[in-house]
Image (cartoon, rainbow, N blue to C red):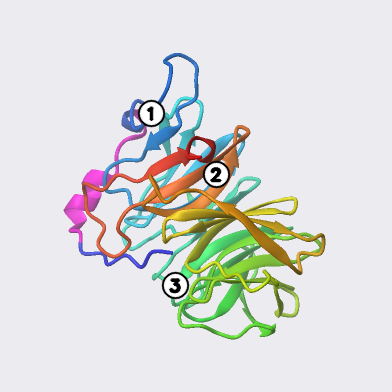
Amino acid sequence: MRFARWSLPIAVCGLLALAPSALAHGGHHGHGHPGPQRPASIDLPAGFSAEAFTAHGGSLYVGSQVDGRILRVNVRTGAQRLVVPGREGVHTNGIRIAGRTIVAAGGTTGKISLYDKRTGQPIRDYDVQGGFVNGVAVLGRTAYATDTLKHVIYAVPLDGRGDARTITLGGDFVPADLDLDGIVPAGHGRLLTGQYGTGLLFTVDPRTGAARRVDLGGATLPKNDGLLLEGRTLRVALSSGTVATVKLDRGLTSGRVVGSTPATPLRNPVDLARAGGRVYVLNANDPQYPMPTDVDQILALDRLR
């Protein structure tokens, strides 16, 4: 989670909107032997200010907090291509793809945007009047987005033809100053989300808002951001500088933290995704004062150990 303080002039933001042909030829640095080996580190354009990414069709899709544009990143070559053009006053924080629809959480804009993946054109902007619309998850025909400041989850139809719904959480959930962030489907119609300020995890029934705390045996995961759930293994990007691994029980009611990556070379890991059989972490820059020269990175998690 990064509350960026946008002070860049529009002229500078315009310079960041590189043409697709330019993006396709740059932005990656491979480590190791030359040749067909996939790069372990991929640099995003300077000043892009990435907050989240998602995997789809073997590629990674990453959004910009500056102008909302979305890039598709080829993890085999590092090549990058513009999929959704930037728009003035638009941010992309959390991002997910379902079929032909890209769902983007708009951060401080308080909106959730739907795009056509093939054309990059907007389908609909839902103004949910959010405080900081952050993580995104998809269940069936509905996209869900967390609000880190208003302590709720929003639900919007993927086809953009219905109204948005606000889900108020109950059960074990107690609001915190900095609240829900990352969110993923958790099976049996549930969602799994993390509370940034307290480091707690919750499963949520989106039909009722009932939340159940995941018992980690007293452990917490403060500054938890992006989540990657594979079976009963949960990886958690902690913006304090590590990626934690949690082993959950079958019902996702309890678990234990079994490991973490070293803090170096991670600066501010904000999200995780698996593409092409490999787990990647999005390594961001200063969350409060993004600069036009900042370069965010996509790193292969297995090369950090």
Residue 214 percent location from the top left of the image: 70, 71
Q: Disc 3 on helix, strand or loop?
A: loop
Q: Earlier in the sequence, mark 1 or mark 2?
A: 1
Q: Disc 2 on helix, strand or loop?
A: loop
Mark 2 is surrounded, within 10 Å at the Cα level, by few (under 14), some (14 to 19) or many (20 or more) other residues, namely some
Query: As drawn, is 50 to the left or to the right of 305?
Result: left
Q: Could you tell me how far apart the alpha carbons at marks 1 and 2 are, in whole angstroms?
A: 18 Å
Residue drawn where x is 35% and y is 40% of the image: 44
Q: Quadrant of residue 236 in the image?
A: bottom right
Residue interval drawn in magenta: 8-21
Q: Could you tell me how far apart the alpha carbons at marks 3 and 2 are, in whole angstroms?
A: 24 Å
Q: Residue furthest top?
A: 35
**Relative vertical location of residue 207 with respect to residue 106 in this rendering, above or below:** below
Looking at the rendered structure, which numbered label has been put on residue 132?
3
- In this view, the mark in front (1 or 2): 1
Q: Earlier in the sequence, mark 3 or mark 1?
A: 1
Mark 1 is surrounded, within 10 Å at the Cα level, by few (under 14), some (14 to 19) or many (20 or more) other residues, namely some
Q: Can residue 73 be seen at all in this image of the molecule?
A: yes
Looking at the rendered structure, which numbered label has been put on residue 24?
1
Looking at the rendered structure, which numbered label has been put on residue 117?
2
Q: Quadrant of the N terminus?
A: bottom left
**Relative vertical location of residue 287 with respect to residue 174 in this rendering, above or below:** above
Of the pair 241 and 90, the residue shown nearer to us: 241
